[in-house]
Image (cartoon, helix red, strand yellow):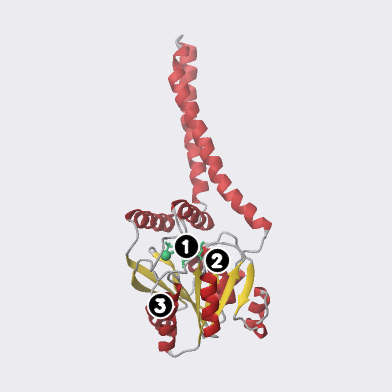
Amino acid sequence: MLSVVGPVYNESASIAEFHSRLVAVLRGMGIPYEIVYVNDGSQDSTLDRLREFSRQDPCVRVLDFSRNFGHQLAITAGMDHAEGSACVIMDTDGQDPPELIPRLYESWRAGHEIVYCVRTKREGETWFKKATAALFYRIIRRITNVDIPPDTGDFRLVDRRVLDVLSDMREVHRFMRGLTCWTGFKHARVEYSRAGRLAGTTHYPFWKMVRFALDGITAFSHAPLRWVTFCGLGASVISAVIGVWVLYVKIFNDQAVRGWTSLMVLVLFMGGMNLIAMGVIGEYLARIFDEVKRRPLYIVRERIGFGDARGGSDPAARRELLRR
Ligand code: UDP
Ligand code: MG
């Protein structure tokens, strides 16, 4: 069976169109399938639509979150509940074309355990988003030791083996595209041109993207901490040189008071450096704090279309059952 996981947040304007395209593709493939929609705390009528799909088609299952937990956790929940031998993860706003699924499936049948989709073109997105995304993927590639391919999103197909590994990784700040690459396995890539949204606007405004980028970097790299150390070392060397000069002026020269400008520059510079260093350490510390709290990653209010015989309501128990 092939599972399709789709996170849905306030997509009532376009979810019906997406769903009918997806179902057409899956039926055309002639294989058993399930669709797991995760309603990530939508405030519009998205949930009603999803209920309707599930009523019409027993292959549609819906997880309804108790509030908005974010895209990455919605994907996580969907993957935890997917029961197929392979699972496709895709956005439900029409930007990831369902028509690509047969190609992903073929590549999986050919023996690849992760088939990720590379965007060759992106329509309907601002140059700013494209430029910052391009920059981000190049930075993260440089400073992490995980080979995260540039210009890929979460649109991909993963094998059951990968699903099992991922569902055992319960870290809180989840950068899913990085985690999948981190697992290793046999990769393949499929290229596609990314369309614009069917309706509405992105749910990733600037600051949310910055946070997401920080999650990605801190989850896979200690480089920022190392930079701070190097900056500290550099600053110490400079201070030592200046210290010698200051002593020289003091001892061999009676114009010692003149140094006000250099003093101000140094104090301000060092103050700034200190704050930046503390900020970087704080970013990591905050994430450690979130991890030690060990809260559940997401809370499901209701499961729709999941038969109880298939493992009950506890995801861990379900996973155990499926593995046996
Ligand atoms: N999404 C979600 N929770 C959120 C934000 C987004 O489940 O808090 C879903 C959204 O419905 C869509 C996908 O995640 O299917 C990607 O979101 P979006 O299209 O806003 O991001 P973009 O494509 O602009 O990066
Ligand atoms: Mg989108």
Q: Earlier in the sequence, mark 2 or mark 3?
A: 2
Q: Is the residue marked by circle 1 packed among few (<14), some (14-19), or many (20+) residues within 10 Å?
A: some
Q: Give the mark toward the camera: 1 or 2.
A: 2
Q: CA distance from mark 1 to mark 2?
A: 29 Å
Comparing 232 with 161, the one in front is: 161
**Which residue is rendered at x = 53% and y = 79% of the image?**
52
Q: CA distance from mark 3 to mark 1?
A: 28 Å
Residues 29 and 253: in front is 29
Q: Which residue is mark 1?
A: 146
- How many marks are shown on the rendered structure? 3
Q: In the drawing, does residue 274 fall left or right of residue 124?
A: right
First reached walking from the N terminus: tag 3 or tag 1: 3
In this picture, is 203 found above or below 156?
above
Q: Position of residue 311 (x, y in %)?
A: 66, 81
The three-letter code of the residue at mark 1 reads Val
Q: Earlier in the sequence, mark 1 or mark 2?
A: 2
Relative image position of residue 33 (x, y in whole percent):
50, 85
Q: Mark 3 or 1, which is nearer the eye?
A: 3
Q: Which residue has dot 2 on it?
A: 40
| Residue 98 tag number | 3
Using the image, determine if residue 296 lies above or below residue 287: below
**Secondary structure beneath label 2:** loop
Q: Residue furthest top?
A: 254
Q: Callout 3, which amino acid? A: Pro
Q: Quadrant of residue 64?
A: bottom right
Give how far across and how far down residue 219 sits, in percent: 53, 57
Q: Is mark 2 within 8 Å of ligand 1?
A: yes
Residue 130: where, in percent of width, then height?
35, 57
